Image (cartoon, rainbow, N blue to C red):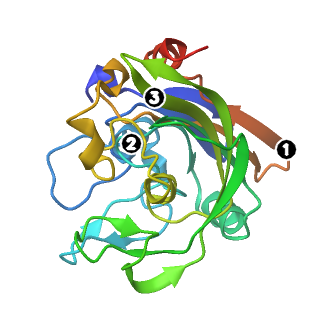
Amino acid sequence: MNNLLEPDIIYEDDDVVAINKPAGLMVHEDGQGGVPTVVDWFLHKYPDSAGVGEVGYSNQGKELNRSGVVHRLDRETSGVLILAKTQAAHQYLKQKFKDREVYKEYRALVYGRMNDRWGTINRAIGRSAKDHRKRSAERGAKGEMREAVTDFERIGVGEYKDEPFSYVKLIPKTGRTHQLRVHLRALDRPIVGDGLYADYKIEKSCNLDLNRLALHAYILEIELPNGSVEKLMAPIPPELEAAAELIAE
């Protein structure tokens, strides 16, 4: 594996391993091939866990290797990811996520000023009518509209190079694809560096001098198969801390 994208282990026991996934590293293959994934790293380190989990398929119907994968982070997102070493652990953790018994907390930098200090974004998410890669929580979304709820807290707000930005804590109550990115786009406060949902901002912005998506999975709190409740934390990446400092007032 590319050492630059080698995950750091945050926690490990006989059932699970939790890592800090670097931005740019895919969780599992997408059927296109050619790039290293978290699953590659996982199987290299834990070969006995091959086949743990559920079989997935690409849009073209190709079977995907998702050994150990319980939940996902987008390729561009860094932070806490938990993997199951055994089938029993996978089923246990999967049920915890399904029953919404997992606390997840993210950090993000967004374009513009978040006017409210606290709030809840309660907007169902469907598919974008304009781009098959995207989801939408706005008028015109198509397909099944699925409940999606995100709590937020504004941590900081300020300007850099005469452009306003906000630093926010995000707590998703549901786990929809691209949920945080879609919800913030719906508020016209998309996440800095989001090539999919902030395309209309990136070209005109200084982007806080970042060259990555400014989204990080900071905390994952969950009861593990061994009965312990663990608060798993992935340190805020230095580049995101530096960007937050640029707008600190």
Q: Residues within 10 Å of mark 2 (few under 14, many from 20)?
A: many
Query: Of 50 and 167, which appears nearest the observer?
Result: 167
Residue closer to the observer: 23 or 145: 145
Residue at 47 percent across and 49 percent down: it is 48
State the image coordinates of residue 177 (x, y, percent, origin top left). 45, 63
Q: Is residue 148 above or below residue 28?
A: below
Image height check: is 207 above or below 36? above
Could you tell me which secondary element the residue under label 2 belongs to?
A: helix
The mark nearer the N terminus, 2 or 3, is 2
Outermost residue on the front side: it is 162
- Judging by the rendered image, the residue that carries numbered circle 1 is 228
Reading the image, the residue beneath label 2 is 38
Q: Is residue 129 left or right of residue 73?
A: left
In this picture, residue 93 sits left or right of residue 60: right
Where is residue 245 drawn, in percent x and y?
A: 53, 13
Name the N-terminal-most of marks 1 and 2. 2
- Alpha-carbon distance for marks 1 and 2? 25 Å
Q: Nearer the viewer, mark 3 or mark 1?
A: 3
**Dot 2 and dot 3 residues touching (CB under 8 Å):** no
Earlier in the chain: of badge 3 and badge 1, it is 3
How far apart are labels 2 and 3 at the CA level?
A: 35 Å
Residue drawn where x is 49% and y is 54% of the image: 68
Three-letter amino acid code at the position of disc 1: Ser
